[in-house]
Image (cartoon, grey):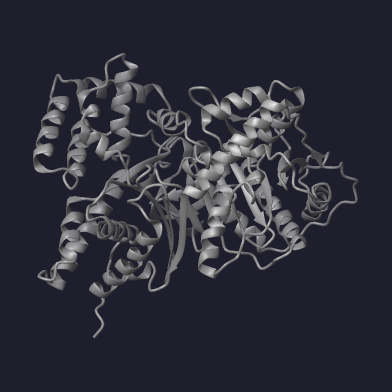
Amino acid sequence: MIFRKIHSGSCRAWLSRVSLRQELCFFSSVPPQPVPPLAQTLQGYLRALEPLLPPEELSHTRRMVHDFGRPGGLGPQLQEGLEKRARLNKNWISDWWVQRAYLESRQPLPVHSNAAISLPRRDFNDWRSQLVFASRLIAAVLDFKAKINTGQLQVEFMRGKPLCKELYPLLFSSCRIPGPKHDYIAHYGRSRRSPTHITVVRNYQFFQLEVYNSDGSRMTESQIHGQLLRIRSQSWKTDKEPMGILTSEHRHTWGEAYNRLLRDKLNQESVRMIETGLFSLCLDSPVMRISDEKYASRKAAQVLHGGGTFSNSGNRWFDKTLQFVVGEDGSWGLLYEQATAEGPPVATLLDHVIEYCEKPDPKRAPLLPLPMPKKLYFHIDREIKRDIEHAKQNLDILINDLDVNVFNFKKFGKNLPKQHQMSPNSFIQVALQLAYYRVHSEVCPACDIATQRMFRGGRTEYIRSPTKQGLQFILAFDNPSVSREAKQELFREAVDAYSALTEAALNGHGIDRHLLGLKLQAIEEGMSIPKIFMDTAYGLATHFKLRTGQMPANNTDSVMCFGPLVPDGYAVCYNPQADHIHFSITAFNCCEDTNAERLARTLRDTMCHLQEMLQPTV
């Protein structure tokens, strides 16, 4: 049995691995996700509001919460409905969560829903090496898929508990489909004749590339490389009409354009090939290089949205679950749509890809003639051309509005918190709240992500901050009358309080999914929305100005990146390594109050000040 450390959600956990052939016995032992006790969630909700509300508003909300939760009140009735739902369904909240958080959202997928992982630059700077590496990457992903299909993928354990693995097969041949009121996710890998092709995009042109031989065997790297060379020879010039840009639109707008596009049979066939493909490979032109620090930010932005309509945005189909990006300059990464799966399963796939890419190619190519990769054509009428023009304008506005700031904090890494018996994730979360306070002179609602995969069909839960202990530390830290020893003690209490919330969330006892479930259960039962959810406090508590996430990968200098949840907020991702931490911060330029560069600068200083507090220099 192999042991290794990986992230699961935002916490670091020990995982052991065994063959998936034994998964059935483990899957039966993956328990259903519990519905937390009502009183516990309501108490947790009030505790979360304490640092955010003035006393008189808190008293008003406390009375409302008490009325909701009293015996014979509305809360216990809705709780009973949720418990019944839990008995009748595989998971009582996951479908509701995916529908509400992703599929009902009408915002564009780039920045708002897609998440990007930018990986360390490969050592090449020309198209020949780009195609060699891309061939290996494709082979690596197919190898991972083969392990799923043949039952060789290892089962993950977290703290001795097996993790649910149902999301892995759904990563492939899946796509988000736009709809008028909500989207849906199409899974084509479940059909009797599963797709055997991927989509390759270069210079805004889409190609169907078969990646299996006629006997069902996977193509070798050299076979794939030969096919990529053929694709390059067919895509010298940039296509005038970047069809993929349409998928970046507001979902209602794209839904209408999608219906117009599919009226034509040629378009229908081309779109279906993209949607059913195992995954997409985007062969990008180089990222403009300025300085090393700016390059890291541009590289992450390039994976996230393609850099704009004059750059590589036309090489994306933002609805697709998996899009691997390989640039001519050695930049590479993965863009994934979170409606199908959040970070941890994707990170496991990436770990396999990175490991595979370091090995030599053992297989020789069979001397078989291969069919030419099929270029996908579109019939573009005046309406579709107009749709593309509007989409180009809107995407460029969105991209120009997003500030992306990536930096590597080199003063210390996760080893420093560990030396002081503190959780590195909790340490960083308290530091983020302190940095935000220093910039904005207030604390704000923040959410971190915890996995729920230790439960059947589980997705994610939020870990909330600030805590009351966190606020006490923040108010004391820049106060010169408070001693260093007192600050140390307050800091430890703040970190421990956050760790306790993390533990509760990982055990299925977070508050956010439960509160959402109670609200949706009321709607399901035909009731009006309970007053507790119409209260201004609930609106404030769910307006997350800090959206955070820890990179769920191990020992790679990768950077995760996505956009803020709210117009006046930030998104902060981080990847703690032993002696350094990678950060990415995004904010919208249209908001005068937020500034990614200012928060990044303040966060750097704050981390140094915390180090000085814990380890003062003589």
Q: Would you identify the image quadrant in which residue 43 lies? A: top left
Vertical placement of 268 versus 2: above or below?
above
Residue at (63, 36) in percent of width and height: 389
Task: Decide if residue 388 is on the left or right side of residue 577.
Answer: right
Image coordinates of residue 82 in percent, x first then y, are: 31, 24
Task: Decide if residue 37 is on the left or right side of residue 142.
Answer: left
Vertical placement of 164 versus 349: above or below?
above
- Tell me if residue 552 can be seen: no
Image coordinates of residue 276 in percent, x first then y, are: 67, 33
- Tell me if residue 267 can be seen: yes
Residue at (70, 27) in percent of width and height: 382
Task: Decide if residue 46 is on the left or right side of residue 8.
Answer: left
Which quarter of the rendered picture does the C terminus lie within? bottom left
Q: Nearer the viewer, residue 231 or 107?
A: 107
Image coordinates of residue 490 in percent, x first then y, are: 17, 62
Outermost residue on the bottom side: it is 618
